Amino acid sequence: MPEGTIKRLTDKGFGFIETGTEKDMFFHNSNVEGTSFEQLREGDRVSFTAGEGPKGPRAENVRVL
């Protein structure tokens, strides 16, 4: 599973994961597993599965490491 760091969280229920490439990975709160979106913090290390959403690539199965 790819890993990254939460770069930014919004109050609208989504965020972005810094993956080490030039593009950050979008994720929605419905794709967070094992914890709630409200417990996530910028800088948390996470693992995820790369998926495809209606607007392009997105992270799915996001889990805090």
Image (spheres, rainbow, N blue to C red):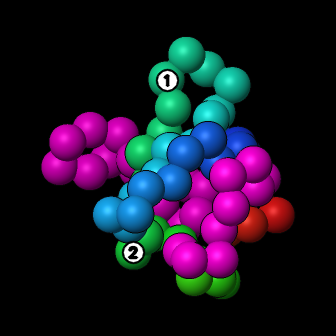
Residue 59 visible in this rendered orientation of the protein: no
Q: Is residue 43 left or right of residue 60?
A: right
Q: Which mark is residue 30?
A: 2
Residue 19: percent from left, percent from top: 64, 33
Residue 42: percent from left, percent from top: 67, 52
Residue 31 visible in this rendered orientation of the protein: yes
3 is within the stretch colored magenta: no
Q: Alpha-carbon neighbours of circle 1 within 10 Å: few (<14), some, or many (≥20)?
A: few
Q: Alpha-carbon neighbours of circle 2 within 10 Å: few (<14), some, or many (≥20)?
A: few
* Amino acid found under the numbered disc labelled 2: Ser
Location of residue 39 by image quarter = bottom right
* Amino acid found under the numbered disc labelled 1: Lys
- The residues bearing labels 1 and 2 have C-alpha atoms spaced at a distance of 21 Å
Q: Which residue appears farthest toward the left when viewing the image?
A: 54
Q: Is residue 63 left or right of residue 58?
A: right
59 is within the stretch colored magenta: yes
- Magenta stretch: helix, strand or loop mostly: strand
Q: Residue at x 51, y 32 (%)?
A: 24
Q: Is residue 40 above or below residue 33?
A: above
Quadrant of the drawing holding the C terminus? bottom right
Q: Is residue 21 above or below residue 28?
A: above
Q: Do the residues under discs 1 and 2 have CB atoms within 8 angstroms?
A: no
Residue 30: percent from left, percent from top: 39, 74
Element at badge 1?
loop
Q: Is residue 47 left or right of residue 7?
A: right
Residue that numbered label 1 is attached to: 23
Q: Residue at x 70, y 43 (%)?
A: 4
Q: Residue at x 20, y 42 (%)?
A: 55
Q: Which residues are magenta?
A: 37-62
Location of residue 33 by image quarter = bottom right
Q: Is residue 50 above or below residue 36?
A: above
